[in-house]
Image (spheres, coloured by chain):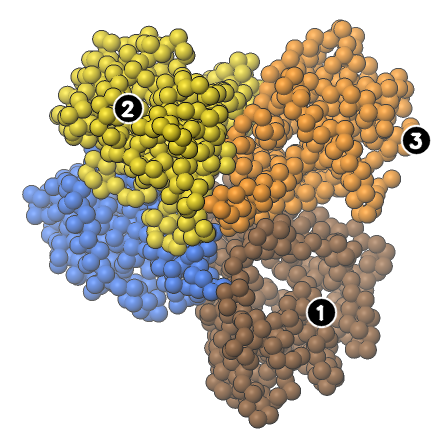
Chain colours: A orange, B brown, C yellow, D blue
């Protein structure tokens, strides 16, 4: 069901509206105080209304979305900095669908329809893949009942996180997403895709969805900053009337537009199967740097108020930086882009 | 990174390809601001006229004047792309701008006389806007036009006039009223560039080449009817014509091509050791610049798509301009730097690309300054795009 | 990178080293904006008093008040350096600022009461300047002081008050006249922080720690004589006191130390493979940042030398502030980035430096914002240093 | 005769005054039109008044300047972008003096006193030194009668450029300094210092003098730009009243102050013999980048007028870039700085 431009704009509006109602910033504040964990109520709503099933093929009663559509959801999820593992579940399901696992393993599909989440380790890149392993580092939002995709040089293993797995929490900069290291034995492996390309596909899909999420994070920080700069007065002028601030905001906006184009281009590349590596490396280089820079500048423009714990801005800064470092840093992707274009390592 | 074309565009493109195949001129394609050689002008004009005749350029004009009346930014984009890929000249000069001005504001007699000449590319046109004291602030222009009897008498100086030395006609902005605020006193004219009293002098740039001209007007007389629209309407006419001007720059100095050329250079140097690379961070920096270049192209394509669907944002063009010009500067700078000490060697003696990168480095600042400096672009983005308060404007200060 | 010391300074330094050796306190040295633990305050105050007593601090005060009357920025610098190198606490709080204000503007009774208490470090002082609506624009402060009978009644709110929860006295700016332009209506006061109606609340920062306070004043009454100078003189007093404040920040968060720590981290990772470095451009980037850090120190030393020879430029301090804070941010950012994906791991679980770099990254923005945002610094440099036209100022707009 | 601060300020004023009178910008314009070559008249004056002999020891009747003083001359020479090979002659003489060559070879000293210039190749760095060689690449201002210092792993050879040497001109970006490749045989070697440290000393001295020259180049471009921004009106305001321009100029000034501190620090390090490598790498990293950036920004602020051949600004841009690339790029020095601090290669 690839959408045309107009449909996609409508879809975006629906997404934004959903998160604005179900995952408002105040909810975020509450999670800050109570500690970071999974937003169960929100996840239930997302499952109920079909958001979690957007990447499930249409013939399996899912949304059948291409990545060009799915990145819209990821971006809006980032904008809301919502606390449910929607982005990983969509990306993971997308890859499972591509390799027919949802059809060959109906019990997996059934669980996902019933609300099981999908996740994967976020510290890997294609050069760090090794032999098939029984552990995963820096897994986002792993919880009993989650499906965990474990990439290796041999392909992908699908693991059910349950009482048989050993999950140890890892404290990170990102206060509104939980991370853990997971250990397991073969008894919990529910499916295996013996194809290295599946691991690469998980990586490219996850990178694009992450870049889209970061774009949303940066857009939210930008919107806050633009509004603040029109409101806040210093020296009897709104600070947005100072040319230094105007040009800063212009630069932030330019970076957002660049990231937008890069994310859309990468999603289309995956959908079309053309120049996939070149496009996702571009998306992470431009988008990863943009999100960190924009959120950091947002803090500078906010001044003291943006330096307080109570202001939500730092949650966006933290997410942008964490995403920048996970799934290959921009520097890693930049070298990989040159290698992909050259067809060989270049130094 | 290619636009997906539908069937009708594919057929349009194939028609153009075939046309180029059968009619390829012998003269070279030149970068955006370079002028054809005088001896090539006849063939250049004939080639451009053929593109009009065969519906590849000017198809958007009203049917009455030889077009289809249907603008199509995707077709424009395909034409730019194909001409560039085939390495054949594209039509240059201010013909597009003046046609827009005449179609919207011209008198019937003006349309009847000039529009057919534009389609047959009988004349080369130049744009006479910038002045030494009116760069970013075009409305500060001082060239005067005074009505004396049945003629306008033009006195003043223009600068950065592309193709001025080859032009038959100019699209001139001059001040007809000194008493009103800056924008209000400006009028638009057509001026015969062969008129007595016009002195066109080549202008040498930092690279040492001459691509532009200074144009001096010493009491140049032009007929009263050469004004476009009414006196004082010049600013409105210009803005409208510029808004219709297609962003042609995209394929002219492709930053993706530059990035690819740099990669080739780096690979070659690995093979034959000719380039003393500046070190092991070359790959990462090249990757960052390549990503930036690819995004520049993506933004440009998105601009074309938005124009095609009528959803262009007010500052899309400004954003592309800033990103393109700054990426281009960064690429050229890196192209020099990665040659190490030998990066200072210029001209044909240069061990790499005949000194291309040294010249590109010096030239690249031109793009961040001209066509609205990047500072002006950032103001536009902040004010028109983001709704931030305006800088004090001349209207207010007078 | 060390200043060359002459014989008298060497002997001063040796005296201090020996003093530290014999009197080292058991309490820890803390970074600039961190407060001592309440249970450490007695020892902290005694240690600071000893530094006064032995002529290492406050030697520049007039002889009448216990000093030598001879300021010496080189001696100040040596003291900063030695206290830092020895890892012993330096005196913190607003004691230095209030002393300057009293010496220049204080009434005789104020001097007689407070100055000896400052030298004996009887009290902890805080500075009550910033407000939620008066950040970069301090003159926009709203806290009011009204004279009711023989008392000033203070109402309002301050923010970012370092050591506020430990302080005995505060150096307060409040508005005593609403009818005049912003700067003119401000007065300076000494306020007893134990007065009824004062509510000091810890403020949590982005890192999750609490190093500052908000201070609320609900009709707090202080004696009429607690005003410093005359009503409306507060701005002048503050500017003068701040101008005398020594730039203590230099050794507190040394960027050269940060760069060295990063180099150590990189070397360690080569040896044991614990740090997944982000790639082969690490060495170049680290070199660039290290060079920047070394220059930050050189600028700071030059500042000390110029102060010592009375040739300080009007914007030297602003330049050091910008270069320090931006180098510090770049180093902290790089410290996180070169850990790759594991750079997100925070706290003691972090494989590198117990999460130091993650916290440093979040904390670093504080320096580019506080003590005059870097935007304000750049305005200062352009206006006071380079003579460029001023931004519209509140004086003009009222 | 190390000067104190006040003496050095006076010395700087004398230098600046000399160049303002003898090498004004109009002279530069003339050289532009006539082609780049050596300014003979100026050189005669520099020799006559003793400027060329500032690094000759006092006991040999020279100025006996330490580098902390000599960089002042280099900076002012850069500010004037003067056309005589003063910087190389001073740097070369400084190294010859350090190794006693002026005393052991009185004929060399005599020639220098009489106006012979000293030069060296500018494309080398300590890692590129090889075996003793009979050629030199990218030599600045080589001409018959010049002394050429040729560095190698074995040390330094002093070569007299004359009819026996083969000099071929190299066209470069730098229009007001001539470069050539020089070939020679052993008959023209007038002295040899068999000590690798001498080659290193030539490098460190040349780097500091170059950084000082670049600083002067950048200061001149900055001064022009500051003046222009106070004069040029657009939108009925001087462009220097726009905050974007004000902050740009502030940033340019900050970079100049950083470069100043770095150059002074490096010169003192050589004079004191402490942290020499660390200091010169710092000077080139900070100073090399600063000069290119400041001159490039100067052009942006000047707009169209600064893009013309007739405006002298591009001569400053060209010199800044050429200096940046010669004698080790900033990137090279940055890696070398880390290596110097670590005592081993670091990657």
Q: Is residue D146 above or below residue A308?
A: below
Residue name at image x 28 percent, y 17 percent: C121
Q: Residue at x 19, y 31 (%)?
A: C71
Q: Using residue C180 as the reference point, say whether residue B189 is left or right of it.
A: right
The answer to whether residue D145 is seen in the rendering is no
Q: Chain of mark 1?
A: B
**Front residue (pair A194, D219):** D219
Callout 2: chain:
C
Foreground pick, A208 / A239: A239
> Same subunit under labels 1 and 3?
no
Residue designated by label 1: B24
Mark in front: 2 vs 1? 2
Residue of label 3: A59
Q: Secondary structure at mark 1?
A: loop
Cα separation, mark 1 vs mark 3, equals 52 Å
**Residue B121: percent from left, percent from top:** 69, 78
Q: Position of residue D225 (x, y in %)?
A: 38, 57
**Dot 2, how many residues are within 10 Å of its Cα: few (below 14), some (14-19), or many (20+)?**
some
Location of residue A244 with respect to C276 vertically, above or below: below
Q: Secondary structure at mark 2?
A: helix
For the N terminus of chain D, the quadrant is: top left
Marker disc for residue C80: 2
């Amino acid at each position: 069901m690839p959408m045309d431009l107009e449909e996609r704009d409508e879809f975006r509006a629906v997404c934004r509206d959903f998160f604005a109602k179900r995952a408002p910033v105040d909810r975020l504040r509450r999670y800050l105080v109570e500690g970071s964990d999974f937003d169960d109520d929100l996840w239930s709503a997302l499952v109920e209304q079909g958001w979690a099933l957007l990447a499930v093929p249409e013939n399996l009663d899912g949304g059948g979305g291409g990545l060009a559509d799915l990145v819209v959801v990821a971006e809006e999820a980032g904008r809301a900095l919502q606390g449910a593992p929607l982005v990983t579940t969509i990306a993971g399901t997308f890859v499972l669908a591509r390799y027919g696992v949802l059809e060959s393993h109906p019990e997996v599909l059934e669980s996902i329809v019933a609300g099981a989440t999908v996740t994967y380790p976020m510290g890997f890149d294609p050069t760090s893949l090794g032999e098939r392993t029984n552990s995963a580092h820096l897994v986002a939002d792993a919880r009993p009942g989650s499906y965990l995709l474990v990439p290796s040089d041999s392909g992908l293993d699908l693991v059910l996180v349950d009482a048989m797995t050993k999950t140890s929490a890892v404290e990170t900069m990102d206060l509104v997403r939980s991370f853990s290291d997971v250990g397991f034995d073969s008894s919990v492996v529910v499916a295996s895709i013996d194809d290295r390309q599946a691991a690469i596909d998980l990586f490219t899909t996850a990178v694009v969805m992450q870049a889209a999420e970061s774009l949303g994070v940066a857009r939210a920080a930008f919107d806050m900053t633009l509004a603040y700069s029109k409101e806040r007065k210093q020296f009897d002028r709104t600070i947005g009337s100072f040319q230094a601030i105007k040009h800063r905001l212009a630069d932030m906006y330019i970076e957002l537009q660049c990231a937008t184009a890069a994310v859309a281009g990468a999603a289309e590349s995956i959908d079309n199967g053309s120049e996939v590596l070149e496009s996702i490396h571009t998306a992470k280089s431009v988008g990863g740097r943009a999100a960190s820079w924009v959120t950091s500048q947002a803090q500078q423009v906010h001044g003291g108020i943006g330096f307080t714990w109570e202001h939500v801005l730092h949650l966006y800064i933290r997410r942008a930086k964490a995403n920048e470092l996970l799934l290959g840093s921009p520097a890693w992707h930049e070298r990989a882009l040159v290698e992909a274009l050259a067809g060989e390592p270049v130094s | 990174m290619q636009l997906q074309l539908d069937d009708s565009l594919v057929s349009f493109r194939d028609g153009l390809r075939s046309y180029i195949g059968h009619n390829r001129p012998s003269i070279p394609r030149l970068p955006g601001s370079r002028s054809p050689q005088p001896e090539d002008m006849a063939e250049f004009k004939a080639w451009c006229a053929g593109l009009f005749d065969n519906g590849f350029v000017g198809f958007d004009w009203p049917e009455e004047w030889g077009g289809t009346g249907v603008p199509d930014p995707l077709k424009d984009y395909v034409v730019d792309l194909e001409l560039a890929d085939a390495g054949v000249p594209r039509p240059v000069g201010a013909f597009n701008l003046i046609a827009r001005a005449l179609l919207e504001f011209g008198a019937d007699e003006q349309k009847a006389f000039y529009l057919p000449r534009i389609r047959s590319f009988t004349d080369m046109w130049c744009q006479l806007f910038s002045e030494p004291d009116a760069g970013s602030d075009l409305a500060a222009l001082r060239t005067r036009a005074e009505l004396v009897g049945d003629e306008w008498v033009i006195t003043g100086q223009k600068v950065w006039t592309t193709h001025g030395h080859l032009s038959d006609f100019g699209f001139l902005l001059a001040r007809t009223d000194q008493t009103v605020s800056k924008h209000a006193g400006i009028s638009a004219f057509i001026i015969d560039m062969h008129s007595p009293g016009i002195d066109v002098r080549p202008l040498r740039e930092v690279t040492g080449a001459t691509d532009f001209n200074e144009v001096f007007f010493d009491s140049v007389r032009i007929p009263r009817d050469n004004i476009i629209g009414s006196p004082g309407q010049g600013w409105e006419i210009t803005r409208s014509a510029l808004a219709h001007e297609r962003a042609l720059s995209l394929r002219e100095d492709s930053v993706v091509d530059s990035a690819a050329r740099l990669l080739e250079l780096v690979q070659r140097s690995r093979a034959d050791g000719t380039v003393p690379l500046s070190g092991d961070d070359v790959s990462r920096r090249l990757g960052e610049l390549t990503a930036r270049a690819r995004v520049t192209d993506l933004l440009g394509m998105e601009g074309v798509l938005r124009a095609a669907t009528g959803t262009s944002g007010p500052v899309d063009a400004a954003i592309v301009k800033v990103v393109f010009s700054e990426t281009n500067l960064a690429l050229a700078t890196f192209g020099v730097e990665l040659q190490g000490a030998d990066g200072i060697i210029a001209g044909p003696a240069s061990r790499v690309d005949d000194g291309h990168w040294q010249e590109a480095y010096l030239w690249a600042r031109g793009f961040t300054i001209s066509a609205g400096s990047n500072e002006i672009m950032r103001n536009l983005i902040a004010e028109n795009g983001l709704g931030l308060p305006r800088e004090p404007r001349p209207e207010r200060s007078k």
